[in-house]
Amino acid sequence: MKKFAISVAALAISTGSALAADLPSRKAAPILPPPPPPAPIWTGFYVGLNAGGTWADSSATVTSLPLLPGAEVLAGLASGGLSGNSSGGFIGGGQIGYNYQFYNNFVIGVEADIQGLAKSSGNGQLNTFVNPVWTNVSVNGSLDYFGTVRGRLGWLFTPTLLIYGTGGFAYGGVTLNSSVYQSFGNFAGLGSSSFSDTLTGWTAGGGVEWMFLPNWSAKVEYLRYDLGTVNQSATVSLVGVPYMGTTTRARIEGNVVRAGLNYHFNWGAAPAPVLAKY
């Protein structure tokens, strides 16, 4: 009887082990690595268009020098600062650039642009009268086109909203004409000079750019520019006899506010990482 009981117990144990082996095993879930950071969406080349307004706060000063004995009083009548209307108007053009996004939230880049101006002429006037001599000095200038080559450095307030500062090289086509008219009763002294060339200088400003769709962004930007100083000389003559020389010194500087639209090619950007599936 005792041997029979031992045999039954052994059979039960072996049967339970066999049944347990047939049950599905339960393993711990695999530990996945943390997701990688989002791919940089700002890195790459872009091109775009812009439009806005510009206004100048240029200034001009006229000085005069007598060329004949006794002309000191006449020369003194044409000296002083000019007051008048600053140039300004509509500005529009295009830009091209490259961005590089680093440390997730920072963007550095370079941009070049050129714009034409629809209306940019301004004028200044200086009028004096000491009986019987009346003097008028007039300076008319215009900025015909304007362009920059700038660096940009920005911070991503959100992954799609960039706040940036910018600065660098500026250039523009400047035309400047000055004239002097003096009347002496029935006689008149006349003189004039003109300038037309490309001036260079600096620009600085900042803006906000929003990536509102994949590959598309919109921006609003302000720039301050300074293209330096133009000096012009003119000789005033009466009945063919020069008696006074004048020098006009004009500072060419102003402001630009514009909006732009960019298309981003993302050439040079790292491809988005591929996530393994389990």
Image (cartoon, rainbow, N blue to C red):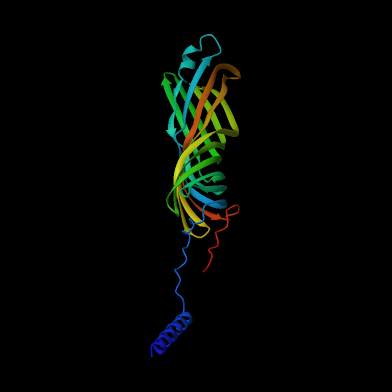
242 to the left or right of 161: right
From what the image shows, is residue 53 above or below residue 33?
above
Residue furthest top in the image: 69
| Count of numbered marks | 0
131 to the left or right of 102: left
Question: Residue at the spot x=46%, y=16% of the render?
Answer: 76
Residue 7: percent from left, percent from top: 43, 87
Question: Residue at the spot x=38%, y=91% of the render?
Answer: 1
Question: Residue at the spot x=47%, y=23% of the render?
Answer: 135
Residue 99: percent from left, percent from top: 54, 48
From what the image shows, is residue 68 above or below residue 82?
above
Residue placed most toward the observer, 51 or 196:
51
Residue placed most toward the observer, 147 or 177:
147
207 to the left or right of 93: left
- Regarding residue 223, the answer to whether it shows in the image is no
Question: Residue at the spot x=53%, y=37% of the render?
Answer: 168
Residue 26 falls in image quadrant: bottom left
- Regarding residue 230, the answer to whether it shows in the image is yes
Residue 2: percent from left, percent from top: 38, 87
Residue placed most toward the observer, 34 or 265:
34
Residue 160 falls in image quadrant: bottom left
Residue 35: percent from left, percent from top: 47, 59
